[in-house]
Amino acid sequence: QVQLVESGGGLVQAGGSLRLSCAASGRIIGTYAMGWFRQAPGKEREFVASITWSGGSTYYVDSVKGRFTISRDNAKNTVSLQMNSLKPEDTAVYYCNVVVGTRALFVWGQGTQVTVSS
């Protein structure tokens, strides 16, 4: 099992930036692909981005391409999401998880709230 703790969310104006972090414990995540997801009010949780275990490949949904960057530090067992040029439609609770493709494998953490004001 993996325990996941997300942090770094907050309130930001449109056009601003935030950097989210995900700390994993319970199991070394260095051999797993990791992903970020988000859930906006009244909507289903959706996949946002993923990164392979080596960090050599990344994948983004079209809505965040060119604005978000996923990275990882396997030595620290962490995954980050740098979010630039934020838009009000990015407002959501953001979660990380171990992934296979775009499918999450483990129990969700508490997530971190991102609110973008217009």
Image (cartoon, grey):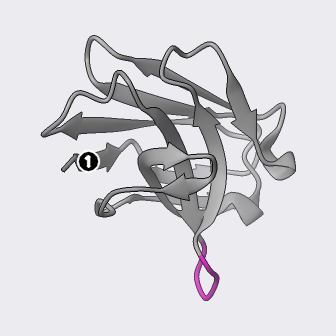
Give the quadrant of residue 39.
bottom right
- Assign a secondary structure to mark 1: strand
Is 2 contained in the magenta span?
no
Is there any visible trace of residue 118 in the rendered image?
Answer: no
Q: Which residue corresponds to the image point at 31% horizontal and 29% vertical from the top-left? A: 29
- Specify whether 74 is left or right of 57: left
Query: In this orientation, which residue lies closer to the viewer: 61 or 91?
Result: 61
Residue 49's x, y, as percent? Answer: 65, 42
Is there any visible trace of residue 106 in the rendered image?
Answer: yes
- Specify whether 76 is left or right of 52: left
Mainly helix, strand or loop, the magenta region? loop
Residue 31's x, y, as percent? Answer: 38, 24
Q: Tag 1: residue type?
A: Val
Q: Which residue corresponds to the image point at 83% horizontal and 37% vertical from the top-left? A: 65
Mark 1, other Cα within 10 Å: few <14 / some 14–19 / many ≥20: some
Quadrant (top left, top right, bottom left, bottom right) of the C terminus: bottom right
Is 42 contained in the magenta span?
yes
Classify 39 as above or below 20: below
Give the quadrant of residue 30.
top left
Residue 24's x, y, as percent? Answer: 25, 37
Classify 97 as above or below 106: above
Classify 72 as above or below 18: above
Query: In this orientation, which residue lies closer to the viewer: 93 or 78?
Result: 78
Classify 68 as above or below 86: above
Name the residue tied to disc 1: 5
| Tally of numbered tags | 1
Query: In this orientation, which residue lies closer to the viewer: 39 or 50?
Result: 50
Q: Which residue corresponds to the image point at 74% horizontal and 51% vertical from the top-left? A: 14
- Specify whether 69 is left or right of 26: right
Q: Which residues are magenta?
A: 40-44
